[in-house]
Amino acid sequence: MSKSMRVAVADITTLTVDAIVNAANTSLLGGGGVDGAIHRAAGPELLAECRTLGGCATGDAKLTKGYRLPAKWVIHTPGPVWRDGAHGEPELLAGCYQRSLELAAEKGAKSIAFPCISTGIYGYPAENAAKIAVATVREALNRLPAPPEVVFCCFSQKNAEIYDKILNKG
Ligand code: APR
């Protein structure tokens, strides 16, 4: 397992990392799933800041403060809705990880936690998504001048086992 990537089973809002990534929607005005959990934990100032951002394109990312969260920053990234894998979903999902790491690096974040973007309400198959997540993060960590520690924050043991298998395959 690469030293700069690890897997955890946790509620991402509890992690004491510099930045947590939010699986948002393009409005950035909150939602269910991890989006709802992050907004609940961060408090109303998060939504107030999100309102100033003018939304975010799928596969892009925007950064806000973390407010009442332990994390300093929240990086909001709308993942693709899964259709059949032939409508640009893999490239858009890779963009979520890519852009989130770029924004984290710009801030000098030393650690960042990702949820399993798009694999909940957006229906992306968990294994396909995990492969894209690990490959994209691994490539970015090799390229970034000061790469952050990366935590793949799973919300189930099942998802964590998917990541463990991929990470330990090397
Ligand atoms: N901590 C970590 N992971 C979580 C948490 C949490 N507190 N809550 C949910 N998850 C996990 C889900 O189990 C899933 O594995 O996050 C992953 C992403 O699922 P969703 O939150 O449903 O996100 P996504 O599939 O990307 O759909 C995004 O859902 O909430 C709305 O506004 C959001 O419209 C957007 C859509």
Image (spheres, helix red, strand yellow):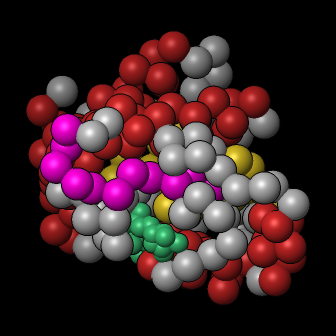
Residue ID at (50%, 61%): 23
Left or right: residue 37 versus residue 39 is left
In terms of depth relative to the viewer, which is nearer, 99 or 149?
99
Quarter of the rendered image showing ligand 1: bottom left
In terms of depth relative to the viewer, which is nearer, 80 or 66?
80
Percent from the top left, x then y, of residue 7?
34, 53
Residue ID at (66%, 64%): 28
Q: Main secondary structure of the magenta part?
A: loop
Q: Is residue 83 magenta?
A: yes
State the image quarter where residue 85 is shown: top left
Q: Is residue 159 above or below residue 42?
A: above
Percent from the top left, x then y, of residue 109?
70, 40
Left or right: residue 21 versus residue 94 is right
Q: Is residue 96 above or below residue 8?
A: above
Left or right: residue 170 versus residue 132 is left
Total marks drawn?
0
* Quadrant holding the N terminus: top left
Percent from the top left, x then y, of residue 11?
47, 75
Q: Is residue 120 above or below residue 126?
A: below
Can residue 52 be seen here? The reply is yes
Residue ID at (70%, 56%): 55
Percent from the top left, x then y, of residue 143?
51, 13
Residue ID at (30%, 29%): 135
Left or right: residue 48 versus residue 1 is right
State the image quarter where residue 30 is shown: bottom right
Can residue 75 be seen here? The reply is no
- Give, as a single range, the part of the protein colored magenta: 76-86
Q: Is residue 149 magenta?
A: no
